[in-house]
Image: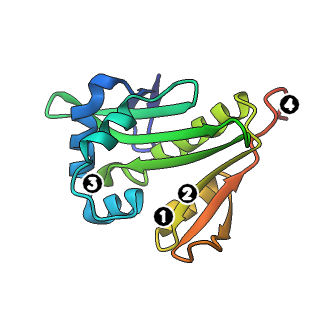
C-alpha cells in the first residue's frame, strides 16, 4: 500500500519479510542515538542477531509488523517500522513505532499507529498499549493525537503507558 506524507512524498507500507533483515539493521544503524534509545530503551548501535531474526520473522497469527519504504540514492530503504504483538489470552496487544529521524513530523507515525489500531480492532483486541519512555515527548504527543490515553507506569517511573480501546470493527463511524 502506498501512502502520501504531509510533504508530498510517497512511501510504501507493507508487512515485514525475512529478507528485510539487512534493511532493518541498516534502518536501526541510521537512527540517531536518541531515536534508538527511545525505541529500544537502550543505546543499541545495531540489533543483536537473535533480536533481528525475531523482528523480521513475525508470526502473522500473533501480530502485525510493518515497514515503510522510501528511496535513498535510488534504492529502497526502510524509513519506519511499526508492530503490535497480540496476547490472545488477555485480548490485548502491545505496539511499538519507530520513524527515521529525517522522516519524523511528516505524518508517517500517525498513519502507522492508525493502521495498528485498525488491525487490533479487526483482531478483537480489547486494549492496545505501548510503553514509552516518559522523556520521549514526540511519541507521547503522537499517541495522544492517535486517541491514546497516557498514564504513569507504576512499575517503572521512567516510562508511561499509552493505551486505547480499539473501536468495535462492526461499528459504523459517523
Of pointers 4 and 3, the one earlier in the residue sequence: 3
- Report the residue marked by disc 1: 138
Q: Which mark is residue 142?
A: 2
Give the camera-side residue of 104 and 130: 130
Q: Are marks 4 and 3 in contact (CB under 8 Å)?
A: no
Q: Is residue 79 visible?
A: yes
Q: Are marks 1 and 3 in contact (CB under 8 Å)?
A: no
Give the camera-side residue of 46 and 26: 46
Q: Is residue 138 above or below residue 110?
A: below
Q: Which mark is residue 21?
A: none
Of pointers 4 and 2, the one earlier in the residue sequence: 2
Residue 97 % position (x, y): 47, 48
Residue situated furthest bottom in the rendering: 157
- Report the residue marked by disc 3: 31
Q: Are marks 4 and 2 in contact (CB under 8 Å)?
A: no
The local secondary structure at tag 4 comes to loop
Amino acid at each position: 500500500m502506498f501512502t502520501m506524507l504531509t510533504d508530498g512524498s510517497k512511501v510504501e507500507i507493507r508487512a515485514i519479510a525475512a529478507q528485510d533483515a539487512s534493511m532493518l539493521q541498516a534502518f536501526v544503524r541510521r537512527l540517531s542515538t536518541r531515536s534508538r534509545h527511545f525505541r529500544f530503551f537502550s543505546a543499541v548501535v545495531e540489533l543483536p542477531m537473535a533480536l533481528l531474526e525475531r523482528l523480521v520473522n513475525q508470526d502473522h497469527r500473533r501480530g502485525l509488523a510493518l515497514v515503510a519504504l522510501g528511496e535513498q540514492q535510488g534504492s529502497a530503504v526502510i524509513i519506519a517500522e511499526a508492530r503490535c504483538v497480540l496476547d490472545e489470552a488477555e485480548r490485548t496487544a502491545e505496539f511499538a513505532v519507530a520513524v527515521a529521524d529525517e522522516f519524523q513530523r511528516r505524518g508517517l507515525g500517525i498513519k502507522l499507529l492508525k493502521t495498528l489500531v485498525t488491525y487490533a480492532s479487526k483482531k478483537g483486541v480489547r486494549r492496545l498499549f505501548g510503553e514509552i519512555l516518559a522523556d520521549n515527548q514526540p511519541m507521547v504527543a503522537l499517541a495522544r493525537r492517535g486517541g491514546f490515553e497516557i498514564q504513569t507506569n507504576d512499575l517503572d517511573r521512567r516510562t508511561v503507558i499509552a493505551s486505547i480501546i480499539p473501536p468495535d470493527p462492526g461499528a459504523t463511524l459517523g
